[in-house]
Amino acid sequence: MDEREILTRFKAGALGRDDAARLLTGARQAVTDAPPPPARPDTALPRARTDAVAPPADPYAAPGAAPPRDGPAPDDRYAVVGIAGRYPLAPDLHAYWENLRTGRDTSSAVPVTRPGLTPSAPGRRGHFLDAVAEFDPEFFGVTPAEAALTDPQERLFLEVAWEALEGAGYTGSRLDALTAAGGQARALGVFVGASSHDYALLAAAAWAADGRTTPSAGHWGLPGRLAASLELTGPAQAVDTAECSALTALHVAVGALRRDECAAAVVGGVELLLHPSRVRDGAGEGVGAVVLKPLRRALADGDHVHAVVRDTAVGRTVRRSGRPGAAAPHRTTGAHESRETTSRRIGSAGAATGIAALTAAVLQVRHGVLVPGDGETTQVPWPRSCDETGREVPRTATVEIVADGGAVARAVVEEYPGTMPGAAGPDGGGGPLLLSAPTPAHLAATARRLADWLSGTADAGHPAAGPPPAGVARALRVGRAAMPCRIALPASDVPGLVTVLRHFADTGDVGDQARTADLRDGGGDRLGLNDLPETRDYLAALWRAGRTAHLARLWLNGVDVDWAALEAASPWTAPAEPPPPSVRLRRPLWLGADGAPEEPEPNG
């Protein structure tokens, strides 16, 4: 049996993964000579059978990948290096995790002040996000008028994807180091699951009532907006397979990473209920995003790994009669996330179902806790199991979403050992702490949020994890985008940082310990250093000499300092708990109006 026949039989389901691996690597043990069993008639994709996705025998093996004939299988795992989301009664993932582990009921009455939902039937209950009409156009460099014409799903995904990238450290100079096979910088792909067009329905109604402005049609803006904002060169695709959309987007993203079409990928999904025709009992909303990188590259780059995506599969379940039907997932040992488990927590959330389930799986393997199931209210400790040799194996969770139309998508998520906190820079102090924002108000709010986080009295559920100031400073320098309004201060002790940051947030004054700059008038880099080829060597010489204060002054004056390149030679790993995300100063923006009424928090 030659290699082609082995692969053909493997893809058709006639050979198991272990048998195919043994044959392809030239092992002496052969598969049985008995004729192969026929392919299953109830599925169109052998890897997406109606039973659970089977893990390989080796917990760290690369599933589904054909190993080379004369060597071990390549590491085909994908690290989750950033993660963010907003779900009912959970403005961030800290709150979402609390809801998961306590089994909280997140249902509420329909928000009476949400634009577009006023005609909804009274008495209905669903699972709703807060303030979906709000957006911060200044942060993303768009006009209020353009923001009002942008689908709130697109706006919300943009915010959450940016948070995930900030957490991963890839909105700043580290983003330039992401190169794919073609050598292009910023080779970050964006893959988003979405299936509803409520805002377009509202716009059509406004047109009929003599309105003459409408938002763009289609879901292309969901990945396209983020790609344009960060000048990305990777693929940007929207995916619609109903409830499977986000998990299908994950599968597409893994394929793009495997083919080296991009060096990293943002994967997510979003669902909002904006039209009264779709509001029903038990309906839900949500938005989430993860940042993926090949595991080997993530470890080499010092990324913090929240969890590992070990396998993905997509397909379709069909009853023998030809009618679509739901799969019967097999509950494996450990966590199993499905459409049903997600619906109990955040309602029937459409295209956001898959990303909510994937996020729940990541959080459970990361915390080592199984969250309550149906009818349960208490979390359960999740000890690691052992293999036949007594060696502990990583916790593994399966995610399986079956859509009404029969589409099915699955993923296997695995625990990965923790990494060390950030180390100091060459001067022993880790270099300066830098913050930037689009306006002075944004900068002051971001400084206050960081001060609260550092002191442990965090706002919006971002608890301080206690990383050293040097590690926090480096994460901010290399991982955050440089915006016009800036502040630089020494990364000294935590109390000193908190005092300076809070004083600046309250008064706008930084005293003698920090410096600020406002480059909104375009007056930065007055000496034209950014245009000189010698500037890069000059900056590198300053860094090697430990003159970080001079580098900070150049940065404040608009010189493009590639901190990631300067610090590349210093071993470092991203903090397990990244600094809190940049603050958004959101306000209501809606079709046909300068603003929309503010939404109160959903009530019980």
Image (tube, helix red, strand yellow):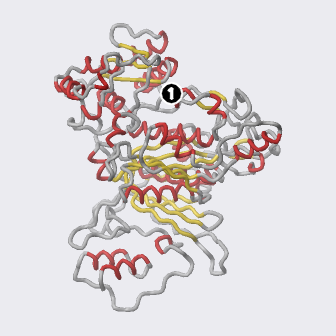
x and y, in percent, of residue 177 in the image: 31, 41
User: How many marks do you count on the picture?
Assistant: 1
Q: Residue at x 48, y 27 (%)?
A: 458
x and y, in percent, of residue 597 in the image: 72, 28
Q: Secondary structure at mark 1?
A: loop
x and y, in percent, of residue 455 in the image: 41, 23
In-front residue for pair 134/397? 134
Q: Residue at x 60, y 49 (%)?
A: 219
The C terminus lies in quadrant? top right
In-front residue for pair 209/44? 209
x and y, in percent, of residue 251 in the image: 47, 59
The N terminus lies in quadrant? bottom left
Q: Is residue 209 left or right of residue 444?
A: right
What amino acid is at disc 1? Answer: Val
Taking 223 as reference, is 172 above or below it?
above
Q: Is residue 420 left or right of residue 116?
A: left
Query: Which of the 4 quarters of the picture holds residue 463?
Result: top left
Residue ID for mark 1 = 583
Taking 440 as reference, is 70 above or below it?
below
